[in-house]
């Protein structure tokens, strides 16, 4: 499967950081190795955080197929569209600061950068972009051509985003705003551009300084997870139609184009992923105070039904409702509706579940995508929830 085709299947005030005690947590290594072997995955990792402590964690497998470097719980994994909830939180910070409103429109914020927008596109709001209800098209051939435009190499990511919106402004709306759920990475790219305009810095810098740093997510980064020339992380893998597995460790082919960052380019260890998820599980009450509690409630509040999508593309919600960067669903095996999301850049797959009623967070990652990866992580997610909830 070509990478361009894979991308179409994407989902896609500072205070003290919470204390964690993963060194005393139960080991999931044996359980993870059994799952990894059964599903033929290069590597897999998982962590469970409850009431602010990591109570179980583990990792199994190798960083790259055909090599010997073993993964650890501190290895960086790509989390794909699980980045969207982080982008929504950055928007919440600017709402708290009075620099944006949930009802701010594309035209109000970016009209000076994107002249000639049609009124319907100009009127799409930030909350509609963050809940996939603005009518913005899912990735299609025209959008993909903009993502992979060779001219992008001449610009920094914020300018890439603006140039892409200018080029697509006449073709972005699939339906009138507010009429339905259309999962759109491009919508999150636009939201990222609005964040950059309001914050006065790039989305990449804002994410790093205002979310990664206060939460002390020391392994977190953006883009390909391995250092160029080193197999020092769990690298992604391409799985073609014949079943051939190819490691994709470095360079432009190892992740999405940078302009799509707000929709899905974050990476971090499964432990740091759990720290972020646990902060959400507490309603942000353990600190740091990234946003006001009422703002986080708005981020977590369901806005639109996703409908039932039995053949949903990897990473996209299959049922339930959608908030801002979070799916909201009551599984058969959960006690109540939970926050959840999948993430994939077509070479990695990640899942997160947050049960605020139980102050429980579960994060799972693997360095390959596809149905085997999704099935493996879903089974593990259910097993860990039933054990620790």
Image: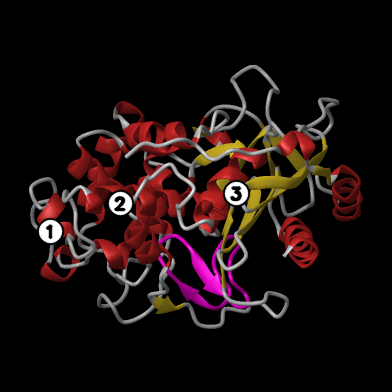
Between 79 and 363, the one lying in front of the other is 363
Element on which disc 2 rests: helix
Q: Nearer the viewer, residue 231 or 19?
A: 19
Q: Is residue 13 above or below residue 105?
A: above
Residue at which label 3 appears: 2
The residue that disc 1 covers is 107
| Mark 2 / mark 1, whichever is N-terminal | 2
Left or right, 365 with reference to 16: right
Q: What residue range appears in magenta?
A: 311-330
Disc 2 versus disc 1: distance between alpha carbons?
17 Å
Q: CA distance from mark 1 to mark 3?
A: 35 Å
Q: Secondary structure at mark 3?
A: loop
What residue is shown at x 23% (from left), y 53% (from top)?
95
Tell me what residue is drawn at x 42 percent, y 52 percent.
Answer: 144
For disc 2, the neighbor class at 10 Å (few under 14, some 14 to 19, many from 20) is many
| Label 1 vs 3, first from the N-terminus | 3
Whether residue 313 can be seen here: yes
Q: How many marks?
A: 3
Image coordinates for residue 101, horizontal then vertical, percent: 19, 59
Query: Which quadrant: the C terminus?
Result: bottom right
Residue 237 percent coordinates (x, y): 70, 41
Q: Disc 2 vs disc 1: which is toward the camera?
A: 2
Count residues near mark 1 (Cα–Cα under 10 Å), then give few for <14, some for 14-19, many for 20+: many
Which residue does the numbered mark 2 point to in the structure image? 91
Where, by quadrant of the figure, is residue 174 drawn?
A: bottom left
Residue 201 in the image: state x and y as whole percent: 25, 33
Q: Looking at the image, can residue 172 be seen? A: no
| Point 54% across, 40% down: residue | 18
Which sits in the foreground, 3 or 84?
A: 84
Most foreground residue, 212 or 184: 212
* Measured Cα–Cα span from mark 2 to mark 3: 33 Å
């Amino acid at each position: 499967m070509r990478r361009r085709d894979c991308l179409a299947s994407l989902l896609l005030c500072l205070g003290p950081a919470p204390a964690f005690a993963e060194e005393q947590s139960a080991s999931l290594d044996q359980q993870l190795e059994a799952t990894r072997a059964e599903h033929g995955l290069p590597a897999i990792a998982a962590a469970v955080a409850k009431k602010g402590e990591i109570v179980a964690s583990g990792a199994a497998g190798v960083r790259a197929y055909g090599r010997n470097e073993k993964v650890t719980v501190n290895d960086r994994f790509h989390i794909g569209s699980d980045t969207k909830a982080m982008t929504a939180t950055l928007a919440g910070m600017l709402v708290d600061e009075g620099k944006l409103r949930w009802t701010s429109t594309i035209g109000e914020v970016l009209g000076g950068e994107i002249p000639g927008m049609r009124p319907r596109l100009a009127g799409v709001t930030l909350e509609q972009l963050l809940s996939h209800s603005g009518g913005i098209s899912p990735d299609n051939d025209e959008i993909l051509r903009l993502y992979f435009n060779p001219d992008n190499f001449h610009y920094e990511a914020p300018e890439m985003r603006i140039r892409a919106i200018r080029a697509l402004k006449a073709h972005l709306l699939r339906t009138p705003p507010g009429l339905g759920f259309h999962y759109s990475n491009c919508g999150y790219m636009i939201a990222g551009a609005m964040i950059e305009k309001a914050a006065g810095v790039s989305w990449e810098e804002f994410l790093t300084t205002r979310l990664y740093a206060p939460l002390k997510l020391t392994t977190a980064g953006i883009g390909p997870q391995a250092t160029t020339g080193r197999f020092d992380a769990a690298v992604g893998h391409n799985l073609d139609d014949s079943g051939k597995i190819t490691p994709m460790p470095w360079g432009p082919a190892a992740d999405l184009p940078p302009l799509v960052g707000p929709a899905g380019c974050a990476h971090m260890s499964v432990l740091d992923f759990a720290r972020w998820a646990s902060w959400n599980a507490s309603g942000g009450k353990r600190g740091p105070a990234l946003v006001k509690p009422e703002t986080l409630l708005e981020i977590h509040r369901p806005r639109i039904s996703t409908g039932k999508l039995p053949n949903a593309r990897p990473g996209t919600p299959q049922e339930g409702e959608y908030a801002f960067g979070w799916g909201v669903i009551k599984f058969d095996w959960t006690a109540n509706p939970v926050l959840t999301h999948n993430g994939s850049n077509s070479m990695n797959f990640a899942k997160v579940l947050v049960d605020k009623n139980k102050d429980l967070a579960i994060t799972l990652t693997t360095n390959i995508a596809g149905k085997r990866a999704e099935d493996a992580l879903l089974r593990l997610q259910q097993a860990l929830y039933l054990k620790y909830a």
